[in-house]
Image (cartoon, rainbow, N blue to C red):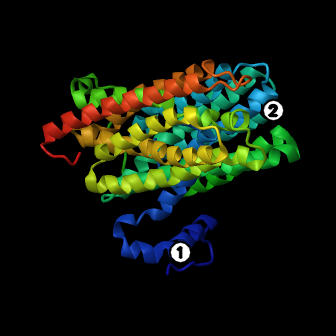
């Protein structure tokens, strides 16, 4: 057991020693998980930064980073009924969509910055912008104010945290990297559980302003811990290109990237609208109506871990294809669900398979990249293009929805079809890659 010394030792040193003492026995049995304390802290960081679409990266970073994005559905419902009741559902969806888009798209720039050794600066910048955006959201009363604070400011801050939270995992793990990534990404789902429940419980007690500020203070606390503890093990690298056009000459990579874009168009629609659907169509009353999003995100935790564990054995593309297809089918089945038990089962299943989709993408891109020296660039390009789906998907879905008349089937069909089509292209990429590699394990 690690010894905690006294004297001039800082609180950060004592905290590290405490974590080491708790996890020491496990790390001795699992050497490949020797960096687990920092991976857990990465999950916390994901909670803080509110953005959407992939490995939200170390557990700390992901928990609060994508956690707010995954929890936007609770804000969507509140804005539609209270704060922005005169604004259309499609316009409100732009807030969460821009947030999710920036979270992923900014990675094209932050990835090379991380490679140059500026992890601490990215964490400080992203942390400040995220917390500042949450606090400004708490005092916003008009649409443009919410868009600037929650959509753009939090989105930019989350984008600074997103790639580091993914990339740092690779610096600590040489074996079972897909599993480690899945555990790290699960932080965003944990944030998606915590944020909606805290917000809904506090809203009737202290109002919108203090309910949102409470989330900001929680994020600030965990971000401070992350900044104090997270450290990359790799030294600065040479500057690299932001864009490699020749990558798109490889058909598996191109098909996969377009497939991800199509899947992202529909993937987040349930997270934004499942709560509104539960209230208007299913007519759920009480706390269950507002906890339905937490149930979906709770199931997503397991979806981000178990499929990644299996991906290390059978190949990430072999796991990504069925998980994407089942997500699309479930979105189409959603049209026929009109009762409480059905909507709960849907949330559990959709949360599992959609969570697997998000967490498997980095492992698939790594499998398609011929040179690991440029895997970050290839991943950044794929995600940047896929982020366009996050940007346009929910506003299109919102335009097809009529909340007042409880009409959702048009958006459900559109989003389900988009995900299914994306799975077809990813399957084609898998078949071509398997033929090139002359192995089924891809």
Callout 1: SS: helix
Image point (63%, 48%), residue name: 341
Q: CA distance from mark 1 to mark 2?
A: 41 Å
The number of callouts visible is 2
In the image, residue 196 above or below residue 429: below
Callout 2: SS: loop
- Give the left or right position of residue 441, taking residue 10 as reference: left
Pointer 2 local density, CA inside 10 Å: few below 14, some 14–19, many at least 20: some
Labels 1 and 2 touching (C-beta < 8 A): no
Image point (29%, 26%), residue name: 244
**Residue under circle 1?**
22
Residue 290 x, y percent position in the rendering: 72, 44
Q: Which mark is drawn over residue 139?
A: 2
Q: Nearer the viewer, residue 74 or 153?
A: 74
Q: Nearer the viewer, residue 82 or 249?
A: 82
Pointer 1 local density, CA inside 10 Å: few below 14, some 14–19, many at least 20: few
Q: Nearer the viewer, residue 413 or 172?
A: 413
In the image, residue 17 above or below residue 83: below
- Give the left or right position of residue 191, taking residue 332 as reference: right
Residue 348 visible? The answer is yes
Image point (65%, 36%), residue name: 73
Residue 295 x, y percent position in the rendering: 61, 50
Q: Nearer the viewer, residue 308 or 284?
A: 284
Residue 283 x, y percent position in the rendering: 73, 38
Give the image quarter of residue 212.
Answer: top right
Residue 439 x, y percent position in the rendering: 15, 46
Q: Quadrant of the C terminus?
A: top left
Label located before the other in sequence (1 or 2): 1
């Amino acid at each position: 057991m690690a010894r905690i010394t006294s004297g001039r030792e800082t609180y950060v040193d004592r905290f590290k020693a405490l974590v080491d003492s708790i996890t020491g026995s496990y790390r001795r049995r699992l050497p490949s998980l020797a960096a687990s304390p920092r991976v857990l802290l990465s999950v916390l960081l994901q909670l803080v930064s509110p953005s959407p679409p992939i490995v939200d990266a170390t557990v700390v970073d992901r928990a609060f980073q994508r956690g707010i994005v995954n929890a936007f559905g609770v804000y969507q419902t509140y804005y539609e009924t209270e704060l922005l009741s005169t604004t259309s559902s499609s316009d409100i969806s732009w807030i969460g969509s821009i947030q999710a888009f920036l979270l992923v798209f900014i990675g094209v720039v932050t990835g090379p910055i991380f490679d140059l050794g500026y992890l601490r600066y990215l964490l400080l910048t992203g942390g400040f912008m995220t917390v500042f955006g949450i606090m400004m959201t708490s005092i916003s009363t008009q649409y443009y104010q919410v868009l600037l604070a929650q959509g753009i400011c939090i989105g930019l801050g989350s984008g600074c945290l997103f790639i580091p939270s993914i990339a740092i995992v690779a610096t600590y793990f040489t074996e079972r990297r897909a599993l480690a990534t899945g555990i790290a990404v699960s932080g965003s789902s944990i944030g998606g559980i915590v944020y909606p429940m805290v917000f809904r419980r506090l809203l009737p007690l202290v109002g919108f302003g203090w309910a949102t500020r409470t989330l900001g203070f929680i994020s600030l606390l965990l971000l401070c811990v992350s900044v104090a503890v997270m450290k990359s093990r790799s030294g600065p690298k040479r500057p690299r290109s932001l864009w490699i056009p020749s990558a798109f000459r490889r058909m598996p990579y191109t098909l996969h990237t377009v497939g991800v874009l199509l899947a992202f168009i529909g993937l987040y629609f349930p997270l934004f609208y499942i709560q509104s659907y539960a209230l208007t169509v299913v007519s759920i009353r009480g706390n269950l109506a507002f906890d339905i999003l937490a149930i979906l995100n709770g199931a997503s935790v397991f979806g981000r871990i178990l499929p990644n564990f299996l991906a290390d054995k059978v190949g990430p593309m072999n796991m990504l294809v069925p998980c994407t297809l089942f997500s699309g089918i479930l979105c189409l089945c959603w049209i026929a669900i009109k009762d409480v038990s059905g909507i709960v089962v849907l949330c559990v299943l959709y949360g599992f398979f959609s969570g697997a989709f998000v967490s498997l993408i980095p492992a698939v891109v790594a499998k398609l990249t011929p040179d690991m020296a440029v895997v970050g660039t290839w991943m950044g390009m794929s995600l940047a293009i896929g982020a366009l789906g996050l940007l346009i998907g929910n506003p299109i879905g919102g335009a097809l929805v009529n909340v007042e008349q409880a009409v959702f089937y048009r958006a459900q069909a559109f989003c389900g079809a988009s995900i299914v089509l994306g799975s077809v292209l990813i399957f084609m990429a898998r078949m071509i890659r398997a033929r090139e590699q002359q192995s089924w394990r891809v």
